Image (spheres, helix red, strand yellow):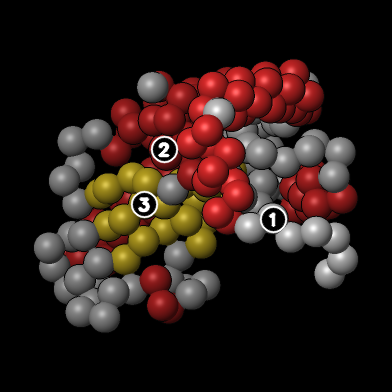
Amino acid sequence: MSGARVHPRRVSALVTRRPWRVVIGAAVLGVAGGVLGGPVAGLLSPGGFADPNSESQVAERRLAAASGVDPHHNVVVLIRPDLPLTDPAGLAVVARAESRLRADPAIGAVLDATVNPAQIARDGRSTYLVGQLRPMSEKAEKDVATRLKSVFAGDPSVTLGGYLLANDEVRAR
């Protein structure tokens, strides 16, 4: 590495001898950073911190168009029926929850334990479903979150989570 090295004692001496110059310098750098970095916020999508024209975002949109589901936007339905999932009554609780999730028009696909057996807890008493959303606007996502909360309200065996619900709660604050 070339160039002069600044000794820490010299920096600390400058700070203690001329504290107001250091404060003013820091303020000037902060203002310059705000002016130069301010436009970046307008380039980011409202749902994340990615440039909408980046290769990854273009690929994500193409994947969503080809598959009919958004690869990152989902809802997770945790089901704890208080019965073993090997019990017909426990399986019926899971089937009812899956049926309600699949019935929502915004859900493009549902991944369950038949797709991934690891979705069943080790103790065999709970499982989860992943509902993948169709591509949609943020407003439509908010409507879906409200609708699914209503559909599963009052069902003590179901807990909702995932991107859709987390994003809805962040937006509400």
- The amino acid type of the residue labelled 3 equals Val
Instruction: For label 1, count other residues whose C-alpha is less than 10 Å away and answer few (under 14), some (14-19) or many (20+).
Output: few
Between tags 3 and 1, which lies in front? 1
In the rendered image, residue 154, in percent from the top left (x then y), is placed at 18, 36
Instruction: For label 3, count other residues whose C-alpha is less than 10 Å away and answer few (under 14), some (14-19) or many (20+).
Output: many
In the rendered image, residue 84, in percent from the top left (x then y), is placed at 17, 73
Q: Which residue is mark 2?
A: 165
Judged from the image, the secondary structure of the residue bearing numbered disc 3 is: strand
Q: Which residue is mark 1?
A: 6
Q: Which residue is mark 3?
A: 77
In the rendered image, residue 107, in percent from the top left (x then y), is placed at 55, 43
Mark 2 to mark 1 CA distance (whole Å): 51 Å
Q: Name which residue lies at 60% across and 49% down.
A: 10
> As rendered, which of 99 and 143 lies closer to the eye?
143
Judged from the image, the secondary structure of the residue bearing numbered disc 2 is: helix
- The amino acid type of the residue labelled 2 equals Leu
* In this view, 138 is above or below 66: above
Q: Earlier in the sequence, mark 3 or mark 1?
A: 1
Quadrant location of the N terminus?
A: bottom right
Mark 3 to mark 1 CA distance (whole Å): 57 Å
Mark 2 to mark 3 CA distance (whole Å): 10 Å
Q: Name which residue lies at 42% across and 39% down.
A: 166
